[in-house]
Image (cartoon, coloured by chain):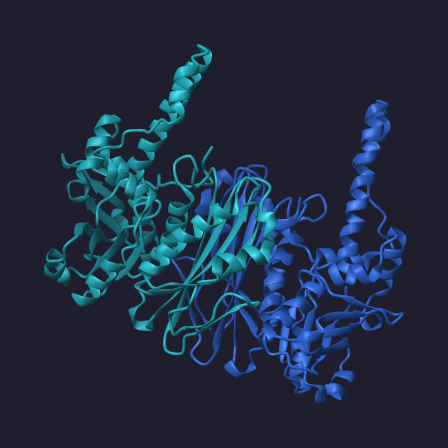
Chain colours: A blue, B cyan
Amino acid sequence: MEISKLGEFGLIDRLTKNIKPENSSTVYGVGDDCAVLHYPDKEVLVTSDMLMEGVHFDLTYIDMQHLGYKSAMVNISDIFAMNGTPRQLVVNMALSKRFKVEDTEEFYAGLRAACDKWQVDIVGGDTTSSYTGLAISITCIGEAAKEDIVYRNGAKETDLICVSGDLGAAYMGLQLLEREKTVYYQQVDEARQKNDTRTLEELKSFQPDFAGKEYLLQRQLQPEARGDVVELLRQANIHPTAMMDISDGLSSELLHICKQSGCGCRIYEQNIPIDYQTAVMAEEFNMNVTTCALNGGEDYELLFTVPIGDHEKIENLEGVKMIGHITRKEFGAVLVSRDSQEFDLKAQGWDPLLKE
Amino acid sequence: MEISKLGEFGLIDRLTKNIKPENSSTVYGVGDDCAVLHYPDKEVLVTSDMLMEGVHFDLTYIDMQHLGYKSAMVNISDIFAMNGTPRQLVVNMALSKRFKVEDTEEFYAGLRAACDKWQVDIVGGDTTSSYTGLAISITCIGEAAKEDIVYRNGAKETDLICVSGDLGAAYMGLQLLEREKTVYYQQVDEARQKNDTRTLEELKSFQPDFAGKEYLLQRQLQPEARGDVVELLRQANIHPTAMMDISDGLSSELLHICKQSGCGCRIYEQNIPIDYQTAVMAEEFNMNVTTCALNGGEDYELLFTVPIGDHEKIENLEGVKMIGHITRKEFGAVLVSRDSQEFDLKAQGWDPLLKE
């Protein structure tokens, strides 16, 4: 159905009609000039992200439902990265004419799946049009007790540096999708040049074979915010001194923590957690898997530091790995390779404003 | 300077380096995964808007500084429309390659001018790239005591319908800008066809003559949120039963209030406040000035209802006009014309999703 058939308010009504706020902090959701929230005993956390078609996502790789899921999840991840609890989400989207009502419904289905997973209420937003492509802006609001909030600036010398899950898989998933796309268009081009209509017809139902690489695709297309790790840390009575989520790559994020905490760091290549599929894929692409883990980004794992006294507690935590420790600022930010060489960490993470 | 020279974090540092939070509710601003806010005794209000180049603004009419000002002001306006006080602003922007660092600085200068006017803190946001044009998403956060909040759904039969300021001027300002642009390009086309290089050279420094029409341009390019009116109402001890700001046009907004309050309305053409310049310009364009006021939009004046007992108090308020009253739902939404004919109000306000 054409979106213009419904108009702005018709579309918003349709997308939001079954949304019922679940959190006691949500006083009033969609439908007025503002949403109304109530946070008498907690600090309010606010984070916001913008995702542009062609820059942050490519709709030949990702469908609208996964895109909705991912858009919500990456913002929810920022709330967890402060040691908070996500509560509300505001969604702005601008759509060009090629999008139909059904596309927006799929996008909302994805958004809602992500929000339902963490009991987050969709409380508002703007739905409008765009001349070219799809633009998405999400704001997520959460809460934390003042004493629980973990900033990036609290890391201290000798603190242990930890990461959850594994790194580099989302990046390898993207490489895989890009390769399949390239191969596909090459085949289409060749068939066109030969006027091979039969192959062209077959290519319409082309399905790339991702068998054995499902984990990489899932990490790229359906990232998960690590609220479970935040909960594990709480249960283990571990309070990180600094924390953030890994969206741009481990190197870039570690340098943020070092800069804001006024310290250096020393991490060990052999300790960086890498999944088997990531390693195999890197081999296949002839890439250095550590480089992928350091600079790949989009893993949305948690990077945090804890006092050295928590060493044993961390060792007993499933899915969390110690990769190094915080040093004095003068020692810089250093990666120690498997053969004991030292390298300066550089922020080569993904920067959309450097993209050519 | 090219934005890619600075990269994302360099640009954000540059744009936000002198931003010092002023509000006690702003605990932590730009620089971490989230901003941290503190609202122990108030309700938190949240509103968000998306503005797309080519749809919501045309950079041949408006410069980056005015655009920044307007982007912030229209969101601040939504907080006032709930009878709240704006406190924080989150800014997302996506820029194509034609934008330079200086453009983003001008945009921020406008944003900050609007924020300074109402002591609003810029606490975060995302700055990224776009393949085509400029996309802006602003989220504004404010506060209100629970009992002070004015929703759209509280209008009651016999309530008086009031508007602040005057209507239709922003729309006439846009018409004026569009006419000048059309005239300009016609002249360029003609000169090109005649190969008239001298005229083409002269046209480069073409300055349209807006003398006597400054008010219309100002209303279009530099709208003001009516926090002053909210304050006046407080001082006069008037508590509106329903309120919203007029962004899409009086008709559309009144119908929102009627729908949400479950009532009808009756407004009088002769009472709709219209500025002299708006009337002159409508005449010049051979347009019905009432239609402009009803459907024009972008005035960002306040539309509100008050109990009929406040009649005298409202009469004494400068810059506020009573334009009609709330009726039972069965009577519909009616405009009574100067010659006492009755018309159904229709939502012909600006809807970006209906734009062809």
Which quadrant is the C terminus of chain A positioned in? top right
Residue that lies at the very extreme toward the front in this rendered image: A330
Task: Point out the image quarter for the N terminus of chain A.
Answer: top right
Q: A326 or A234: which is nearer to us? A: A326
Q: Position of residue A127 (x, y in %)?
A: 49, 48
Vertical placement of residue A233 versus A214, above or below: below
Estimate the x, y position of residue A37 in percent, counting from the top left.
43, 69
Q: Is residue A342 left or right of residue B119?
A: right
Residue at left 52%, top 56%? A91
Of A271 and A264, the residue lying toward us: A264
Q: Is residue A169 left or right of residue A157?
A: right
Q: Is residue A57 visible?
A: yes
What percent of the width, then of the height, locates residue A297?
71, 59
Residue under the point 56% across and 81% down: A148
Q: Is residue A244 above or below residue B169?
A: below
Q: Nearer the viewer, residue B251 or B227?
A: B227
Residue beneath the point at 62% across and 45% down = A53
> Considering only vertical position in the picture, is B82 above or below A314?
above
Q: Is residue A127 visible?
A: no
Residue B187 in the image: x percent, y percent? 38, 18
> Does residue B159 appear left or right of residue B39 in this picture?
left
Q: In the rendered picture of this protein, how many numbered marks are placed on residues?
A: 0
What residue occupies the far top of the structure in this picture? Answer: B194
Which residue occupies the foreground of this view, A258 or B219?
A258
